[in-house]
């Protein structure tokens, strides 16, 4: 019995193991089936995503300025690979229309429809009106403002008879070309006196302001009632009148709706300056006589360059004007500018006033002090020198400028200079040699030499015929030789007459074709350089 029992137990265990194995197989099979289904669904989904239409037709309201690729997509997941191929700039978005739009997704093209529609009614501000007996209804009279993106028409219910003083109901309809409409019942009051009149502060006021037909109804209201209205004082005024035993009134409302006049100016300042709002205001005024101005911009003084500045002007009735101007902040990195530093020409040993007529003006700070370094100017010796002027502003910007100082020579300087020249080039030479030497060293130009031709000739080693003749005269005189300066009648040429060996002869140290000498009168006159010019023969000794 025990053996059989053991067998039965083993059999039971075996059956249990088989059952477990079968269950495991079922689970595994189920998992595979689920995975397969998921895989199939994923494939189907991916195929759907890939092959379904990526774009849709689009309807937009008239007035939409532009559309983008996102507007046409069925899902934003396609945005990265989608493009609009149609040139949208060629589409007129101001008109109702239908347009084919070509799009692409990953290079594959699709055509969709863009519809531009108008479903919005016109925007209209209506008004009730007052008119006179016999008024013919005009649709525009009931419209204060209308706006639509397309053309509009206005229709009203016509009233054949407006010969009674009463209120009429007028239906006013504003309709665009696409059938969208805005409608309102407005009141038409037939009267001779406007029930309410608005008058701007400071404007003129007369019977014509309150009467609908002044030519017909001027006698229905007294001038004294008109004079009750003071257009310089805001408020409400009641004008009364009686006509056909009936009392009429008109309310006149004087009010200020006009903003102040404001005129601004641009400003340029340096970085260490400040400004107030008043610095920007060129002119401000208002009919009320009271204007408050406000600087609405926080000025950044730490930033150089241009800043837009806004200023507001408001009157006591709340009317406001806002204007914008420009503030330019400059960095102060330039020193003062000198004026009055023209060349100075002074006599030897004179006292020079270096400050006279000189100013150093800084664009930021105005007049600045300056110093003068005159250590290199020697007024005891003729010559050209330079004084150095220096000025500095409070920020340390420095300017240095030089001024030319000419110390004029005197006769002693001329004599000394000539003696040096004479000793170096002319000592011991004959008249002809002296003439030739001056001619070769002192070149020709057209300058007459100013107040001291000899000094000019020696300093510049040049001069005209007058300079050469004076130098030769001075040399001959120093050598003890009798001579005279001679010139043509028209004074276009100067040279020298020299007396030596008991006779007079002509000598000419001017470079060019002139005969150097010695020459007789006939030889000098007939020379090519003279060109027929003569001298006063009676005024000079004869050279024969």
Image: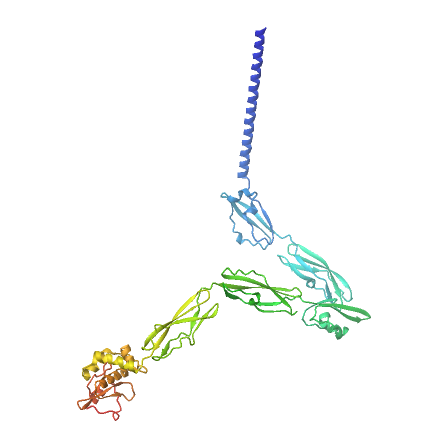
Look at the image and tell me in which quarter the C terminus lies.
bottom left
Is residue 188 shown left or right of residue 10? right
Hey, which quadrant is residue 541 in on the image? bottom left
Q: How many marks?
A: 0
Look at the image and tell me in which quarter the N terminus lies.
top right
- Which residue appears at 48% of the width and 70% of the height? 366
Hey, which quadrant is residue 215 in on the image? bottom right
- Which residue appears at 56% of the width and 30% of the height? 37
Q: Residue 520's spot in the image, x, y percent?
A: 20, 88
Considering only vertical position in the picture, is 433 above or below 141?
below
Q: Residue 126's spot in the image, x, y percent?
A: 69, 60
Considering only vertical position in the picture, is 428 above or below 333?
below
Which is nearer the eye, 429 or 356?
356
Q: Is residue 494 visible?
A: yes
Which is nearer the eye, 521 or 358?
358
- Which residue appears at 18% of the width and 91% of the height? 502
């Amino acid at each position: 019995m025990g053996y059989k029992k053991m067998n039965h137990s083993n059999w039971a265990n075996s059956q249990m193991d088989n059952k477990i194995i079968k269950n495991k197989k079922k689970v595994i099979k189920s998992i595979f089936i689920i995975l397969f289904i998921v895989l199939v669904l994923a494939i189907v989904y991916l195929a759907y995503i890939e092959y379904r239409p990526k774009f849709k037709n689009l309807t937009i309201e008239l007035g939409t300025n532009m559309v983008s690729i996102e507007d046409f997509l069925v899902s934003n997941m396609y945005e990265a690979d989608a493009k609009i191929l149609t040139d949208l700039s060629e589409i007129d978005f101001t008109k109702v229309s239908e347009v084919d739009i070509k799009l692409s997704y990953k290079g594959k093209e699709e055509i969709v429809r863009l519809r531009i529609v108008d479903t919005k009614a016109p925007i209209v501000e209506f008004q009730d009106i007052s008119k006179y007996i016999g008024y013919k209804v005009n649709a525009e009279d009931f419209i204060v403002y209308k706006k639509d993106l397309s053309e509009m028409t206005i229709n009203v219910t016509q009233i054949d008879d407006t010969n009674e003083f009463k209120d009429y109901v007028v239906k006013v309809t504003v309709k665009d070309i696409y059938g969208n409409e805005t409608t309102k019942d407005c009141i038409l009051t037939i009267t001779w006196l406007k029930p309410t009149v608005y008058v701007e502060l400071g404007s003129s006021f007369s019977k014509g302001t309150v009467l609908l037909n002044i030519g017909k109804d001027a006698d229905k209201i007294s001038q004294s009632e008109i004079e009750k209205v003071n257009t310089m004082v805001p408020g409400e005024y009641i004008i009364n009148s009686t006509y056909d035993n009936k009392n009429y009134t008109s309310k006149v409302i004087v009010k200020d709706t006009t903003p102040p006049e404001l005129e601004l100016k641009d400003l340029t300042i340096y970085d260490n300056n400040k400004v107030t709002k008043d610095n920007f205001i060129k002119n401000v005024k208002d009919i009320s006589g009271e204007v408050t101005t406000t600087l609405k911009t926080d000025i950044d003084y730490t930033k150089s360059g241009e800043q837009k500045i806004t200023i507001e002007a408001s009157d006591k009735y709340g009317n406001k004007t806002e204007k914008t101007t420009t503030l330019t902040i400059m960095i102060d990195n330039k020193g003062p500018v000198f004026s009055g530093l023209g060349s100075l020409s002074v006599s030897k040993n004179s006292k020079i006033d270096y400050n006279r007529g000189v100013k150093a003006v800084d664009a930021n700070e105005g007049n600045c002090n300056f110093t003068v370094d005159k250590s290199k100017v020697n007024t005891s010796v003729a010559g050209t020198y330079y004084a150095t002027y220096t000025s500095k502003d409070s920020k340390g910007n420095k300017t240095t400028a030089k001024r030319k100082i000419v110390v004029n020579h005197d006769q002693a300087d001329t004599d000394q200079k000539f003696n040096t020249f004479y000793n170096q080039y002319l000592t011991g030479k004959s008249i002809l040699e002296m003439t030739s030497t001056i001619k070769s060293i002192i070149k020709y130009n057209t300058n007459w030499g100013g107040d001291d031709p000899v000094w000019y000739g020696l300093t510049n080693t040049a001069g005209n015929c007058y300079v050469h003749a004076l130098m030769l005269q001075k040399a001959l005189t120093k050598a003890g030789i009798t001579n005279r300066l001679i010139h043509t009648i028209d004074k276009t040429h100067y040279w020298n007459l020299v007396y030596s060996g008991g006779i007079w002869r002509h000598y000419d140290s001017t470079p060019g074709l002139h005969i150097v000498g010695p020459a007789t009168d006939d030889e000098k006159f007939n020379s090519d350089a003279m060109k027929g010019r003569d001298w006063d023969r009676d005024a000079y000794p004869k050279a024969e």
